[in-house]
Image: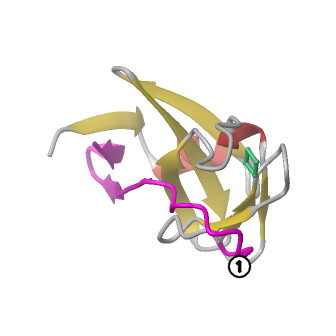
Amino acid sequence: MPKYLLFKDLSEAKEKVPLYTTALVRAGKLEICLAHTEEGFFAVSNECTHQRAPMHKGKVVQGCKIICPWHNYTFSLRNGEELSEHGCPSLRTYPISISEKGVEIEL
Ligand code: FES
């Protein structure tokens, strides 16, 4: 799987994307929402599976979840699952790896 370098190290990631915030990452044609939670960094597709809202404008909350900015559906950042029981498909998730190479996302 190709990897895409996001930050040179964890300190830079934490500085640029503070706890409970998000960043929009563009990798090729993909738009990805990077979220900083109490369990670390998670990446999901930036398009809500309900009506395509930009997830990076949503709210990251405790429990490793993100709330969509348009209709407040809640999704798990761990596995992308829609948790508010509206029957929406899961968000796609992308693994984040942290190593001596930096903070990378696997596409
Ligand atoms: S567009 Fe995300 S909940 Fe409606």
Residue at image coords 35%, 58%: 95
Q: Position of residue 96 (x, y in %)?
A: 38, 55
Say whether residue 102 is magenta: yes
Quarter of the picture holding the C terminus: top left
Which segment is the magenta one? 83-107
- Residue 86 visible? The answer is yes
> Badge 1 is on which residue?
63
Q: Quadrant of residue 24?
A: top right
Residue at disc 1, CB closer than 8 Å to ligand 1 = no
Residue at image coords 56%, 49%: 11
Q: Is residue 13 above or below residue 67?
A: above
Q: Position of residue 104 (x, y in %)?
A: 34, 45
Numbered circles on residues, count: 1
Q: Quadrant of residue 75?
A: bottom right
Q: Position of residue 39 (x, y in %)?
A: 59, 73
Which of the pair 45/3 is nearer the observer?
45
- Badge 1 marks a residue whose secondary structure is loop
Residue at image coords 57%, 39%: 46
Q: Disc 1 residue type?
A: Gly
Mark 1 surroundings within 10 Å by alpha-carbon count, few (fewer than 14), some (14 through 19), many (20 or more): few
Residue at image coords 57%, 42%: 33
Which of the pair 41/65 is nearer the observer?
65
Q: Is residue 32 left or right of residue 99?
A: right
Q: Residue furthest front?
A: 87
Q: Position of residue 61 (x, y in %)?
A: 79, 67
- Residue 16 visible? The answer is no
